[in-house]
Image (spheres, rainbow, N blue to C red):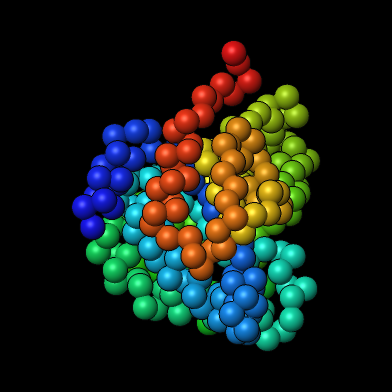
Amino acid sequence: MFQWLNQTKEVIEQQVPEHIAIIMDGNGRWAKKRGLPRIMGHREGMKSVREVVRTANELGVKSLTLYAFSTENWTRPEEEVSFLMKLPAQFLESDLKDLKERNVKVEVAGEISRLPIYTREAVQQAKADTVDNTGLRLIFALNYGGRDEIVQVMQKIAEKVQAGLLLPEMITNDVIEQELMTGSMTDVDLVIRTSGEQRLSNFLLWQAAYAEFYFTDVLWPEFRRDQFLEAIEDYNQRTRRFGGV
């Protein structure tokens, strides 16, 4: 316990990223290694979600975006997709009271209209119940795809230009960012991906333009508080230049 307290204190004394985004990868491989169905890996991964959310909140992270379900994930086996659709509702039903007490604000990025009604109702209820919270912004990327997001933004801006509400020369980074699914959120500072894969997988393509990347071989169900703190410590070894020198 004292080792964890010292490690947490050391991280807090360093620079904590304002916005962390996580690609939670490796649930299926975790289950396969143990001879279990893939869905058991997703269930175990929820424990990592809970621990990482609490740690991020304790550290003072302002925004935490979790890649829960991508627009490409619909191609997975029907049983697995059905289970994944139930997970957000199960997590929020069991943890919403704790999130409210910890002053966490729940948000969603993605096309939720395609999600099952029980999933939509759970996330909408969580958003409504935490709308006034001022702590960590916890964003679940559900049915989210970075390219789809950018296409939708361009369509909205094109409609405004066509309607005479906006001139082409008035289109700036700020105008585009106002239309993003992540809204007023700051750009991503740190992207974490578990399981050894080293790609963005269509995640926050605009928002992660100058993010630092942290790749780890640890599978998501095994990525807990200690691994999260290690990622932040690694982040603090970087020098961010944003194109400068």
Residue 226 x/y as whole percent:
39, 54
Residue 182 shows up from this direction: no
* The quarter of the displayed image where residue 168 is located: top right
The number of callouts visible is: 0
- State the residue lying farthest toward the left: 2
Q: Residue placed farthest to the top in the image?
A: 245
Above or below, 171 against 231 in this view is above
Dividing the picture into quadrants, the one containing residue 144 is bottom right
Q: Quarter of the image for the C terminus: give it.
A: top right
- Residue positioned 52% across, 41% down in the render: 190
**Residue 101: horizontal and vertical position, in percent?**
24, 64
**Horizontal arrangement in the rendering, residue 217 relative to residue 46 (left or right):** right
Residue 56 at x, y percent in the picture: 37, 51
Image location (x, y in percent) of residue 22: 54, 53
Q: Nearer the viewer, residue 43 or 114?
A: 43
Question: Quarter-wise, where is residue 41 in the image?
Answer: bottom right
Q: Which residue is rendered at x = 47% and y = 45% of the image?
A: 231
Q: Establish if 83 lies above or below 61.
A: below
Residue 44 in sight from this viewpoint: yes
Which of these two is toward me, 209 or 7?
Answer: 7
Residue that appears at 74% across and 44% down: 154
The image shows residue 237, relative to residue 117, as above or below, that is above
Looking at this view, is 207 or 59 the one in front? 59
Q: Is residue 237 left or right of residue 196?
A: left
Work out which quarter of the rendered image holds the N terminus and state it. bottom left
Left or right, residue 140 beside residue 56: right
The answer to which of 163 and 13 lies nearer the viewer is 13
